[in-house]
Each structure stands twice: as structure tokens, then as C-alpha cells.
Image (cartoon, rainbow, N blue to C red):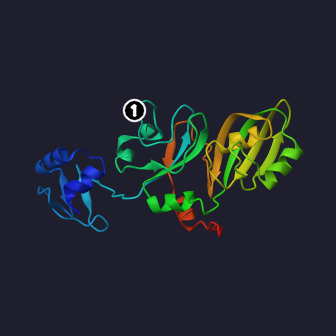
Amino acid sequence: MRIDKMLANLGFGSRKEVKKLLKDGAVIVNSKVIKDSKYQINPETDTVLLHGEEVEYRDKIYFMMNKPPGVISATEDVREKTVIDLLEVEDAVLEPFPVGRLDKDTEGLLLITNDGQLAHKLLSPKKHVPKTYFAVIEGQVTDEDVRVFEKGVTLDDGYETKPGKLTILSSGKRSEIELTITEGKFHQVKRMFQAVSKQVVFLKRLTMGPLRLDDTLELGEYRELADDEVEQLRSYEVKEDQN
């Protein structure tokens, strides 16, 4: 890989700006000052210093975000703020994207990465990656609702969902619940409750597969996944749908 491409990809400036850094002698590779922008390096084995600080090369990035309401799960939009807009410049430069979508008014766990293979594994409709949500429901959620969800709910368009695990945390005029589903249909949680004549007034995703929302993250904050979290996602076994 060319040294200027590596540094530009990592967010240290445009190609033109990186060339100036090289010309000024700010870049050292394996104890040697490098001024040639076409100089070839191996990011995995060569030691690169910029202004005396070691440059850590990353080609894959993984972030956990506590998505705030009012922000859309997209990479770009001409009218709305996106989750990518919340990233620092140096984190956005490798072009990460949200894995799946949370509705604009839904908050909680969102995985952001540029690892397309992992994203496909987690999102493939032939696989059943569980996702757990906390919700506040307008109306009293009952044991009968639990039984209905266990069998699958018929949505407004006639689609019958796969079984969902509904847990009642509190029940009253406004109920609090947790719901685990293995699909990601459009507005699915909201439509499942509409099917039993109830309305979701607050929705937050807590888990996706083995990944659980870090409760120290404030709304809009994110952090890089730890190595063991990335490995759990990569090695996570999902059931292949044979139908």
C-alpha cells in the first residue's frame, strides 16, 4: 500500500495534505524519514510514525452506538441528521455504515462497521439473529398477548411474524415490556403491538445477537468494540432458515 493512501484513509488529511506532511519530513517508516508519497509499505508489519506518534492502521472498524431519537440509521441524507454524522472525522473516514435500521424515533443499540461480511451474517433474512427491545406500551399488556406473540402475530399487511418472546415488566394503563424477535420487518415491534390493539410510545433496542448495549453510553455516544466483542460477533452461530 502507498504511504499517502494509508495516511489519507486513516483521516490524516487529503492526498495533497498528506504529500505535504511527507515533504516536510513528518513521516518515518521503520526509523527512516520517507518523503516519497508513492513509497510502498506493509501496514501489518511496518512501523509508521507521524510527528513522532505511532500510526495504528485499521482497515475494519466496529462501533457500538446508543442511537438517539431524531437521527436516522443511514450513511447520508440531504435533510436529516444520520448516525454517521455523529461520528468523529477520524472514525468516519473508513466509510462505516449502520448494520440494520432503527426507526428515527427509536433509540438504543446500533452496530456501525465497514465489515460487509459480518453485516450480511447479522442481517440475512435466512438467519435468525435475536434482537431484544424495551418498550413502553399504551394499554395493558396481558398474558394473552404473551401467548399470541409466542405463536406469531399477523401484521396489517397479512404477514405472519415468527414467534416473539414477550416479557411483561409492569402492566397497567401504560405497560413496560421486553420483546425478543428474530426478524427485522419495517416497524415490526410497533406493528406487532398494533395487531393486539396497543400502541408503542417508547422503544429502545437492548441487544443484537451476543452484543448488549453498554449502559454507560449516553444517547448519541459510541465506543469501539473490544476485541472479545468483535470475536463474539464473528463466531456467533445463527440458525439457517431452511425454508
Tell me the amino acid under the disc marked 1: Val
Q: Can residue 183 be seen in this snapshot?
A: yes
Q: Nearer the viewer, residue 15 or 20?
A: 15
Q: Position of residue 88 (x, y in %)?
A: 39, 40
> Residue at (71%, 52%) from the top-left corner?
161
From what the image shows, is residue 121 above or below residue 135? below
Location of the C terminus (image quadrant): bottom right
User: In the figure, is residue 175 to the left or right of 7?
Assistant: right
Query: From the image, which quarter does the N terminus lie in?
Result: bottom left
In the rendered structure, the answer to whether residue 193 lies left or right of residue 228 reads: right
Q: Is residue 9 above or below residue 32?
A: above
Q: Residues within 10 Å of mark 1 (few under 14, many from 20)?
A: few
Is disc 1 placed on a helix, strand or loop? loop
Residue at the spot 51% in from the left edge and 34% down from the top edge: 71
Identified at 15% across, 51% down, the residue is: 22
Can residue 227 be seen here? The reply is no
Please say if 145 is above or below 228.
above
Residue behind mark 1: 78
Query: Residue 93, position in %: x, y?
Result: 34, 47
Q: Quadrant of residue 58?
A: bottom left
Could you say which quadrant of the image residue 192 lies in?
top right
Q: Can you name the residue that lies furthest to the front here?
A: 158
**Image spot of residue 36 (x, y percent):** 11, 57
